[in-house]
Image (tube, rainbow, N blue to C red):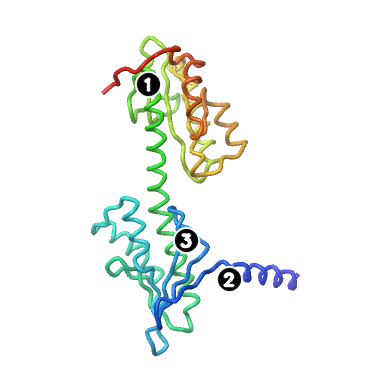
Amino acid sequence: MVKMTDSVLGTYLRAYSSLIATEPVDENSVTLSFPFHLASNHRIEITVTDLGKGRCIVSDAARTMGEMKNAGYSLGEEVRARLEAMAKPAGLRLVGDYFLLESSHADLGISIQKFLEMSKTIGDVYLIHKQREIREDDLIAQVKTILDSRQVLYRERDRIRGQIESHPFDLIVPSNGRLGMAVSVLAGQTTHTLAQVWGYKCDDIRRERSNDNIKLALVYDVRFGKWSNTSKRILASRADIALPGDSLQDLPKQLEDQGVVKAGQSRGPNLP
């Protein structure tokens, strides 16, 4: 068993080492590029500078803050204070736009690992959440365009009361004398959990008899996470319409099939 463990560990370390790219910056600095990605799909890069006398400094060369700026964050005092609080337990400091960690040569390996983990944590907390918002808004905008083109009136960011609790939806088509509809875009990494949560939400709404004339539509973002067949079946079995985000061209036909719109409806005004 020991030989097996050593063999597996050795194989992994050799493969991991081959995936790390290094590039000299100058006589005293080198940049390491790791096989870990931020939400923007950029690899995490760390620069190590030799300070002499057995000391060195590990830095991100302002890459993390640059990624956050590109994602649309305003890096004011409040955001910086939160970043400093996140970085402090690992020994990192925020100086200007640079995250820094001073280390001895002897502890450099551990220091690089600490820096790598903290860079990934900050990226996950800020950048993934931001990208999810951007991608959700993009899909919601596409659904709104389809509804507008079919003269369907809707409200944005509203709720529907279920038997147990009320549930938020991105778009709600009022049921004024006809079938209504509630639409939500689902995006995230824990896709199976999302499917289970929305399965419950749909069931709760169905149990409230006053919602009998409301159709439920769920659009799941396949760009952000992988949806298993089981997760897709949960959504399809609970919602009237369950579409992947890359198949929104099928939404008009499904709206007709569900009776929410009539064939040939044209563009009209929207609710305030």
Residue labelled with disc 1: 149
Labels in figure, total:
3
Residue 161 lies, with reference to residue 24, above or below; the image says above
Going by the numbered disc 1, the residue's amino acid type is Ser
Q: Distance from label 3 to label 1 (Cα)?
A: 41 Å
Q: Amino acid at mark 2?
A: Ser
Mark number for residue 241?
A: none
**Vertical position of residue 70 compared to residue 110: above or below:** above
Residue 256 appears at what percent x and percent y? 48, 16
Q: Secondary structure at mark 3?
A: strand
| Cα–Cα span, label 3 and label 2 | 15 Å
Residue lying at 33% horizontally and 61% vertically, measured from the top left: 65
Work out which residue is located at the far top of the displayed protein and give it.
177
Q: Amino acid at mark 3?
A: Arg
Determine crowd level at label 1: few under 14, some 14-19, many 20+ residues with C-alpha closer than 10 A.
Answer: some
Task: State which tag comes first along the sequence, 3 or 1.
Answer: 3
- Mark 3 crowd level (few <14, some 14–19, many ≥20, 10 Å Cα): some
Left or right of 77, for residue 205: right
- In this orientation, which residue lies closer to the viewer: 57 or 212? 57
- Of the two numbered discs 2 and 1 in the rendering, the one whose residue sits closer to the viewer: 1
Q: Is residue 122 visible?
A: yes
Q: Are marks 2 and 1 in contact (CB under 8 Å)?
A: no
Pointers 3 and 2 in contact (CB under 8 A)?
no
Q: Which residue is mark 3?
A: 43
User: Counting residues from the N terminus, which is met first, the one under dot 3 or under dot 2?
Assistant: 2
Could you say whether the residue bearing mark 1 is in a helix, strand or loop? helix
**Dot 2 crowding, Cα within 10 Å, few <14, some 14–19, many 20+:** few
- Per the image, the residue denoted by label 2 is 17
Q: Quadrant of residue 83?
A: bottom left
